[in-house]
Image (cartoon, grey):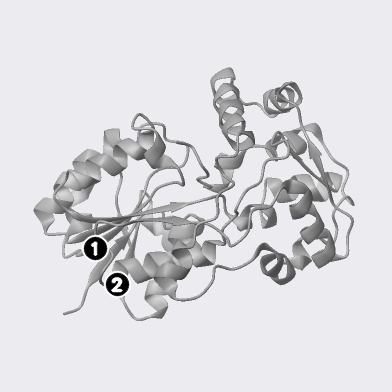
Amino acid sequence: MSVRVLVMGATGEVGGRVLRRLQERGEQAVGASREPSRAVQRMGGQWIELDLERPATFQPALEGVHRIFLVSRPGDDAPDAVAGRLLEAARAAGVTRVVNLSAMGADADPGFGLRRLELLLEASGLRYIHLRPNFFMQVFASPPLLSGILATGALRLPAGDARLSYVDTRDITDVAVATLMGDGHDGRAWTLTGPESLDHHDVARHLSMASGTAIHYQPLTEEEAAAQMAAAGLGPARVHRLLGFYRRVRAGFCAPVHTDVQAVLGRPARTFGGFAAEHARHWTAAGSRSGKAGTRAEAIDPAVHESRGVLG
């Protein structure tokens, strides 16, 4: 039987890769967007309207859908508040499986928004799989972090000497497709990391070696980070939230290495060194641009990347 898959978050890094991979495989995959006509113009493929704030869009979007790749809105502190109605509609429409993009460590705090969404999905009666990725390697190859590197020749983050087991979004994509289309994963939670834990001095060395350009890591104090975020136009609540997030990073919550990528795919996760070598062209001009305060401030906001990280 042909399986129809609805991919949410398909204009973002992971959701977009999942949609393209499914379409390349010849699967019946459709992207969900509040503005499907714009998505078609930008990315091509098949799209349908789905707006979490407009329940009237649910039934048409879910018609004939068997499986959903669920991605909550980046930066949403209460993803469960809107997703509950969608899950009810999905069950009524006959959806048989939901693969949920969550976050590494989400299960550590039942009050955390993504964990509340996990629990809601688990209680929905739908078959589910949780994917809990760490930070994405790709954050270094796209704005705003890339903008900061090019402007200053430095990674400027309030991360101290913390280690992170960055994961390649291509591995997340492969796991997402395997769990959407394969069997034996229902009810599982897979924590997705790279095969090594690196501090940002290590990251800077990898970027430097790959690109042949000197890049260094400059740790920021909370005061420096707060000032730069404020200079970039972030409000006090946003600044407070991000500083709290980086305290968890510095406490080591992002450091553990898991082997779930290999368990699902039967191959090791991609290394950061390999990622850097493949994307070296992005950093060859590091430090050559005249840096502006706004550019440097933007470089410390991880939410722009749709990156999940350890938030539990």
Q: Residues within 10 Å of mark 2 (few under 14, many from 20)?
A: some
Above or below residue 298? Residue 184 is below
Which residue sits at x=60%, y=24%?
239
Which residue sits at x=9%, y=52%?
92
Identify the image quadrant of residue 294: top right
Q: Inspect the image, locate mark 2, and give the three-letter code of the amino acid beneath it.
A: Met
Judged left or right of residue 147, residue 78 is left
Above or below residue 8? Residue 302 is above
Q: Inspect the image, locate mark 1, and give the three-letter code of the amino acid beneath it.
A: Arg
Task: Give the x, y percent position of residue 156.
Answer: 77, 39
Q: Residues within 10 Å of mark 1 (few under 14, many from 20)?
A: many
Task: Give the x, y percent position of residue 269.
Answer: 55, 67
Identify the image quadrant of residue 68: bottom left
Judged left or right of residue 90, residue 287 is right
Furthest toward the top, the residue is: 236
The residue that label 2 is drawn on is 181
Q: CA distance from mark 2 to mark 1?
A: 9 Å
The residue that label 1 is drawn on is 67
Q: Secondary structure at mark 2?
A: helix
